Image: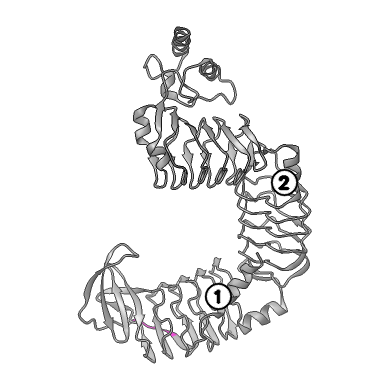
Amino acid sequence: MKNRALFRTAAACLACLTAFSVTAVLPHTAQVPAVTLCASAAEGEPYTEGTAGVLTYRKYNDYALIAACDPEAETAEIPAEIGGVPVREIGADAFRGCAVSEVTIPDSVTSIGTRAFFDCQNLTRAEIPDSVYLLDAQAFANCAALKEAVLSEGLKTIGTEAFAGTALQKVTVPSTVTHFGQGIFDGTPWWEALVEEEPLVIFNNIVLDGRNCEGGVAIPDGVTEIGTYAFECSGITSVVIPDSVEEIGMDAFSYCESLTAATIPDHITELPIGMFCGCISLTSVKLPAEVVNLRSSVFSGCTSLEEVIFPDHQVDVYSSVFSGTPWLEAKRAEDPLVIVNGTLIDGRTCKGDVVIPDDVTIIASRAFYSDPDITSVVVPAGVENIWDSTFESCGKLKSVELRGVSYIARNAFNECTALKKLMLSGNLETVSEDAFHGITGRIPLTYGGTREQWGKISIASGNSLLRLAIVNCGEAGDVDGDAKLSVTDVVALQKWLLAVPDARIIAWNRADLNGDGVLDTFDLALMKRELLAKE
């Protein structure tokens, strides 16, 4: 996965290098020629399109956007107002590849779009007025002659690679900037000199870059954020994150192959995507005391990770968090169902019929992905969601029982081609796109709700299995959602009425046998009578 960094670097070098001068000016009003009425597909609102000198604009109800410039124009002056409305945006690719040597930006403009001045070959200076709060991704990237950029207070966001591949010699980053994209100044002389002098680059209490750091790193107290890819592929051996840090970007420490230890503050509630992915020397980690989410691939590929210390509470674990770690292999050897505090993290080595324990309430995405040997699964009532690709490509899976699930995500059972029996909870509300894709034929489907409820379920495309299935709906008294009245329903309702911890009723409408809108002992008595009558 080191290729990620190489890909981003290559992408920044693909376009030709460019240059021109951009300055801020006082407002003036353009003379507006005849216009054409258009419909905006992107913004979803109508606009009129016209030209003002070398510029093409779009005029909306209360603002105008500069959409393009004559590619042969040598200078361009953006008006502050067109047709009585302020010019607020310079649109994506508006000046891309133009030959202009000078452009003036009025202080009516508030945002400069993606690649707005990308690849303009005569750019030497850019002055952004203090009205601009957004400078989007690659706005001035690959302008090879751009040596000076004046960024004003008021700017809040500088997008990914905004000045990458330019000739910047000096930049003053405004104190108002609170969001930095990745690689903003990559490849510029100013940035290279900066990281050579101080490998740990921090602006506005945000760590932007630590990729040239080596050895032990203690991030200074007062830092509030660690940026995306901030330390990727660096030579650090340990890192201490201070209590002042509130946010950590994805892949912040990915592929730090010499990293052996990391100290994370207890108040951090989420570890982001790929945070320590590919840290092959990391042997042990203590999760923050207040963590509730481990996003995808946090520790994936940590081939030396043997110890993971969880907090006492349940943690929501996303896909492939511990993929390729000795910790996961050891847990699988203990039990093919890897469960920590009610979260089922992995079940890919399960065989035959699998009954997930009742205390499980979260199943990680892709937990059973491509398990070649699982033949049936019973998911307990406490599990409300089946996430993306959880059972995808389980080729021998024949029977599925979802006792309390209300949401089935995309590709959850994709390509489970052997599926012949399906039981769905009366709580089911949504089946996402391709959840049962690739499964053909008509199968018996048991549904815990009524026929009317079945008709109200939102079923997205790619789920012909459900539309063609032979649906058998539940009967009165079926509170556990298995489409039949039995002693388990009596026990379930009795526990619920006694307020037994973790007691659950899946099909509430089935429990109200006397139809008074209240679940009580009268319903329990009627349920027992119905059951005795059946016997």
Q: Is residue 113 above or below residue 496?
A: below
Instruction: Specify which label sits upstream in the sequence, 2 or 1.
Output: 1
The residue closer to the viewer here, 425 or 25, is 425
In percent of the image, x 56 and y 71: which residue is there? 175
Q: Does the magenta stretch include residue 518?
A: no
Q: Which amino acid does label 2 sit on?
A: Leu
The image position of residue 426, as x and y in percent, is 44, 29
Report the residue at 78% width, 49% height from top.
306
Magenta region, residue range: 23-27
State the residue position of label 2. Answer: 328
Numbered circle sitting on residue 11: 1
The image position of residue 170, as x and y in percent, is 59, 84
Residue nearest the viewer, comparing 94 with 197: 94
Does residue 239 appear left or right of residue 503 in this picture?
A: right
- Residues packed near mark 2 inside 10 Å, few (<14), some (14 to 19) or many (20 plus): many
Q: In this view, does 498 lie to the left or right of 212?
A: left
